[in-house]
Image: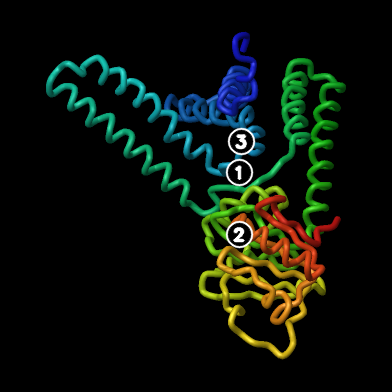
């Protein structure tokens, strides 16, 4: 830290040191809660105490950075911790015996199978029902949790009323902030066009959560953090690859999404009146589109629209007195959100 203070903000550094500090302080106290006579049961309990102590130290950081909590961490640690010890010994043995024919092959074979078995067990645990909980906390909640953890250490040492009251107050702050965040999340309502040139992703949030996209994997990658932060349910994914246009009404506003030139050579006696027209890269900008076939109040060029076409849309909308927004230029388009 003296030579590189920025390490203090490195995720690996934070997780490593919080785990070590928590194990050093909490593991003896947790292990001392239950006295076990049987040798093997005592080993299992001490291993569980290590896992619980490490989780106490790292859980707030893990949830803050990765937005998930491993529900079966005790089970997985019963596999990983012994396996890690065996892997360490086997790796050292492989290094020592690497010049020795046959022996090096045997050690490498053992090391390979330890790794395979450990990986298979972890994958099995990962696929168990409810193996992960999606959780999101903000910076204030992270600070309140670690402050509460230090207050717990103070209380365990002093057993004073002030230390206990401090723990309660800090946890109360955590839950008040959580309640506030959930209150605002429950009132989220609107449409988001994500800024991603590789795919069209429209997030429709309200009583139902629907995502219109040309790439479901990109949609999940882009939206995962936003969805977990706002405690949104898993969305219904609707593919735009099989349809040339999509129309929907949201809070009295009419939306039309165009992904190709379906309207370019069509005729209409009267233009379709919409509030928001969202166009993708395959839609050719021309005056007929926004004058003869669709009459929008706002035109939104999605992130995959080329710079050349953005400039064309800008000129056309200025001429027709239509409000214009470019996702590629101005970032994600967010409409209708209110608290």
Residue on which disc 3 sits: 62
Question: Where 1 falls versus 326 (above or below)?
Answer: above
Separation (CA) of disc 3 from disc 1:
7 Å
Q: Position of residue 169 (x, y in %)?
A: 85, 32
Residue annotated with mark 1 = 68
Farthest residue, direction top: 2
Q: Quadrant of residue 249?
A: bottom right
**Is 162 left, or right, of 198 in this rendering?**
right
Return the residue at label 2.
Answer: 305
Residue 102: give x, y in percent of width and height: 13, 24
Q: Is the N terminus in the top left, top right, bottom left or bottom right quadrant?
A: top right
Q: Nearer the viewer, residue 192 or 75?
A: 192
Look at 48% across and 26% down and name the residue there. 42
Judging from the image, what secondary structure is the residue with disc 1 in?
Answer: strand
* Disc 2 packing (10 Å; few <14; some 14–19; many ≥20): many
> Which residue is located at x 58 percent, y 66 percent?
237
Numbered label attached to residue 198:
none
């Amino acid at each position: 830290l003296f030579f590189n203070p920025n390490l203090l903000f490195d995720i690996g550094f934070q997780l490593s040191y919080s785990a070590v500090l928590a194990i050093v302080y909490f593991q003896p106290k947790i292990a001392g809660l239950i006295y076990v006579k049987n040798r093997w049961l005592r080993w299992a309990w001490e291993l569980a105490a290590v896992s619980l102590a490490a989780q106490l130290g790292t859980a707030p950081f893990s949830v803050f950075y990765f937005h998930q909590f491993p529900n079966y961490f005790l089970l997985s640690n019963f596999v990983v911790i012994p396996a890690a010890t065996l892997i360490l010994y086997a790796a050292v043995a492989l290094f020592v015996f690497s010049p020795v024919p046959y022996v090096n092959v045997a050690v490498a074979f053992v090391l390979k199978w330890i790794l395979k078995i450990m990986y298979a067990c972890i994958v099995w645990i990962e696929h168990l029902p409810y193996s992960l909980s999606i959780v999101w906390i903000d910076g204030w909640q992270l600070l309140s949790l670690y402050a509460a953890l230090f207050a717990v250490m103070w209380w365990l040492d002093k057993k004073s009323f002030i230390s206990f009251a401090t723990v309660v107050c800090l946890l109360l702050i955590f839950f008040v902030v959580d309640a506030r965040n959930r209150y605002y999340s429950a009132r989220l309502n609107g449409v988001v066009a994500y800024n991603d040139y590789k795919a069209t992703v429209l997030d429709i949030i309200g009583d139902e959560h629907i995502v219109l996209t040309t790439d479901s994997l990109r949609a999940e990658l882009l939206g995962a953090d936003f969805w977990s932060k706002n405690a949104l349910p898993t969305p219904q994914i609707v593919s735009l690859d099989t349809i040339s246009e999509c129309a929907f009404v949201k809070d009295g506003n009419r939306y039309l999404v165009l992904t190709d030139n379906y309207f370019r050579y069509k005729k209409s006696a009267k233009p379709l009146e919409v509030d928001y027209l969202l166009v993708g890269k395959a839609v050719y900008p021309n005056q007929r589109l926004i004058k003869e076939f669709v009459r929008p109040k706002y035109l939104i060029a999605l992130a995959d629209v080329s710079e050349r076409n953005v400039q064309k849309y800008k000129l056309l909308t200025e001429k027709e007195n239509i409000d214009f927004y470019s996702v590629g230029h101005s970032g994600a388009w967010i409409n209708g959100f209110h608290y």
